[in-house]
Every structure is written in structure tokens, then in C-alpha cells.
Image (cartoon, grey):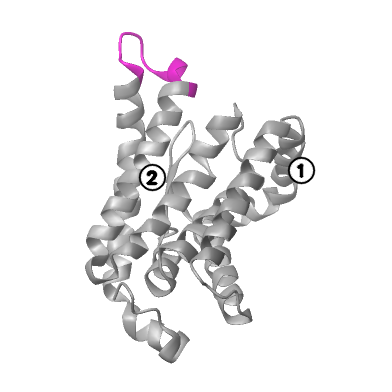
Amino acid sequence: MFTEFIEKISEIPAGFNAAINDLMGSPVSVAAIALLMLAAVLIARFSKIKFTPRVMAHVALAVAMTVVLNMFVLFRMPQGGSVTLASMVPIFFIAFIYGPNIGVLTGLLFGVINLLLGGVIVHPIQILLDYPVPFMLLGLAGYLPKKMNIGMILATVLRFASHVISGFVFFAQYAPEGMNPLIYSMIYNGPFLVADLLIALVVINILPVKKLGRRMLGKDLDLRYW
């Protein structure tokens, strides 16, 4: 696993350049991602969230941790998707501490970076469904910090739905002959997301999330949902 991590690091420049070139060939994709980012920032602003240096530092750290953990691949699917070393945990954690809006923004930032690190680009809608959108949906777990397990399960189901739609619409050709592409997409995306979710559930239940949140934010901890 560590050897694969080193190889992944070495492949970043080439993957980044390739992704940028592919994106530049699809202005619609660039515009869609830019609009998503603008919408996330505006939602956070209208929610009266102050982007203090502390908030930005915690979001940046969560995104960086997600990127690193995502590189530790336990199992990789042939057409994309993998079981990782708790890569969803930083997004869930920031969502539980700061609330769903910041969680969604964190997921969006990771999704864009994940795309730029060598994502598969087929269509502008496919890019959204496989990269920014599913990780943004993980941030919605922040609506249920008192029921973190349920929040993580529901958010992962939403991520699953996004990947399934992408697979059904844009990767139907990989379905075995005679198999419904929707069923194939569900069977393909289900196992690695279930495994990723189980790992995240174990880690989050070990972490003292609220205690860490109070240490990080003190009296500024958002208790609206707690």
C-alpha cells in the first residue's frame, strides 16, 4: 500500500497536467465547476459563516488529509472507485464540527482537487456526478451531529446515488451483455462505498468528535445542530 502511495505521488504532475488539458477542452465543465464553487461560497456566506483564518485553515487541513488518505488505496475498482484508508472521515468531521454548509464546501474542494489529480473525464455532467457533487453530499452529514452514524449513512447513500447515475448514463457500455446498466452501476458502486463507509463509521466512533470540536473552536462551536 505504501509503495502504491509513493507511485501515486510521483504520478501527480502528469495526472494534473492531463486533467487540466482535458478540462480546458471542455469550457462547459470548467463553468459548471466554477458555478458550483460560487454557489457553495454564497450559501456559506448567507448562512452567516465567517471565513476566519481558523475556519480556512481547518478546511484546508481537512481537504489535505482527505487527499492523502485517498491515496492509500486498499482496493481499486477496474473502471474507477476504490476502498481507501478512511478518506471520507475528514469531510464528515469538518461537517459535524462546522455544520453542513462548511462540510459541503470542504467536499466540493476535495472533489475538484481529486478531479485535477487525474480524474476520468467523459462529459461535463459526468464530471459533476463523479467528483464535486458526491463529495459535497457527504457534507450533508453535518445536519445530524447528534446521530452521526445515521448522518454518515444517509450522506453516503446520496454519494452512492450520484455515482450510480453517472455509471448508468455514461458508462453503460461496461455492463455485461444482457444486464441492465442501472443494476450494473449499483452493483459496481455499492461494494467499495459500503467498505469505505464501514471504515469511516469505525474511525468516527473512535474519535471524540464533540470534544475535539470544543478544543478546536471553544465557545464558537456551532451548537445549532448539536
Residue that mark 2 sits on: 159
Q: Earlier in the sequence, mark 1 or mark 2?
A: 1
Provide the secondary structure element on which disc 2 rests.
Answer: helix
Residue at horizontal 24%, vertical 62%?
A: 149
Crowdedness near tag 1: few (<14), some (14–19) or many (≥20) residues, C-alpha within 10 Å: some
Above or below 117: residue 103: below
- Tell me, for residue 200, which label it has, or none: none
Above or below 210: residue 179: above
Above or below 168: residue 109: below
Q: At label 2, which amino acid type do we have?
A: Arg
- Tell me, for residue 17, which label it has, or none: 1
Above or below 19: residue 11: below
Magenta residues?
170-181
Q: Position of residue 187 (x, y in %)?
A: 30, 30
Q: Quadrant of the C terminus?
A: bottom left
- Image-quadrant location for residue 210: bottom left
Q: Position of residue 220 (x, y in %)?
A: 45, 86
